[in-house]
Image (cartoon, rainbow, N blue to C red):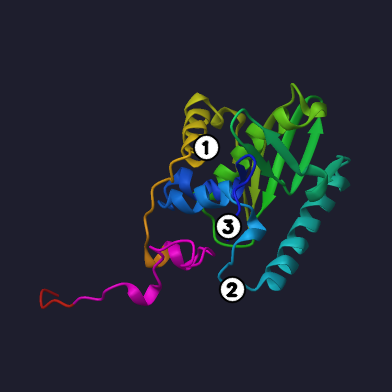
Amino acid sequence: MAVQRDMPYIWITWLTKLLVGEYSCEWAAWFRANHEGGSYDKVPSTFDATEWKLKHTELLTSVRSNMEADGRTVFTESQNSFKLKGSTAILAGKPDLITVSDGVGTVLDVKTGEPSPSHHVQVMLYMYSIPKAFQQYRGVVFDGKVVYQDHEDYVPNSAVDDTFIGNLSNLIQRLVSTSPARRVPSGVECGFCNITAADCSERMEETDVDTGDTQDF
């Protein structure tokens, strides 16, 4: 049985696809935010985590080594883990790489898959959170980079503007509400969701999606 958290806890990656509209079902993030992760059954994953970790670590190590070869001090993964406590929820994350020089910081996240707008938003969420979560980064202006195998995308500090912060705040308020957030069940999103039908009565399997026919084409 799912156990209620003492305070809503939100992992940054639960927000990224919702903020850019790649996902529509806010209920899944609401459920995770409000219930202890170890208290409910989960759909077994078919994702090859070992292969992903090997590729991710290889790319991260290459990026870090290049930066250190340029004389920069680089902080890696667990060194960057944070929990940012607000008035209604805790926002948590773990940026891949952080470096600061002369009061200007860069937060980098490496990605081994296809580019996605949600990757940019993930970095923007780190850029917003890090100066608030770490005493040593207070007053530091952060830019961001999403690093892929064959290129990198620059994310300027100006992207974290009032509109972005407002959208983030509004989404978090919906996820911490005592009223469940909006469900949008679909074969696609439910296929990537690990919440079982025991907790989500509207969960769909991809085979539940109707396939019609027409003579028009």
Q: Quadrant of the C terminus?
A: bottom left
What residue appears at the point 69 percent right and 31 percent down from the top-left corner?
142
Q: Nearer the viewer, residue 46 or 33?
A: 33
Give the side of residue 194 with respect to residue 205, left or right.
right
Mark 1 highlights which residue? 172
Q: Is residue 149 above or below residue 15?
A: below
What residue appears at the point 61 percent right and 36 percent down from the top-left corner?
89
3D distance between C-alphas at marks 2 and 1? 27 Å
3D distance between C-alphas at marks 1 and 3? 20 Å
> Does the image show residue 45?
yes
Q: Which range of residues does the magenta coloring cover?
A: 189-212
The spot of residue 27 in percent (x, y) is 45, 51
User: Tag 1: Cα neighbours inside 10 Å, few (<14), some, or many (≥20)?
Assistant: many
Disc 2 on helix, strand or loop? loop
The spot of residue 120 in percent (x, y) is 56, 45
* 2 or 1: tag closer to the N-terminus: 2
Q: Nearer the viewer, residue 35 or 70?
A: 35
Q: Amino acid at mark 3?
A: Ala
Q: Is residue 192 magenta?
A: yes
Q: Quadrant of residue 39?
A: bottom right
Q: Amino acid at mark 1?
A: Ile
Mark 2 highlights which residue? 44
Q: Amino acid at mark 2?
A: Pro
User: Tag 2: Cα neighbours inside 10 Å, few (<14), some, or many (≥20)?
Assistant: few
Q: Quadrant of residue 83?
A: top right
Q: Quadrant of the N terminus?
A: bottom right
Q: Which residue is situated farthest in the left direction here?
A: 215
3D distance between C-alphas at marks 3 and 2? 17 Å
> Does the image show residue 149?
no
Mark carried by residue 2:
3
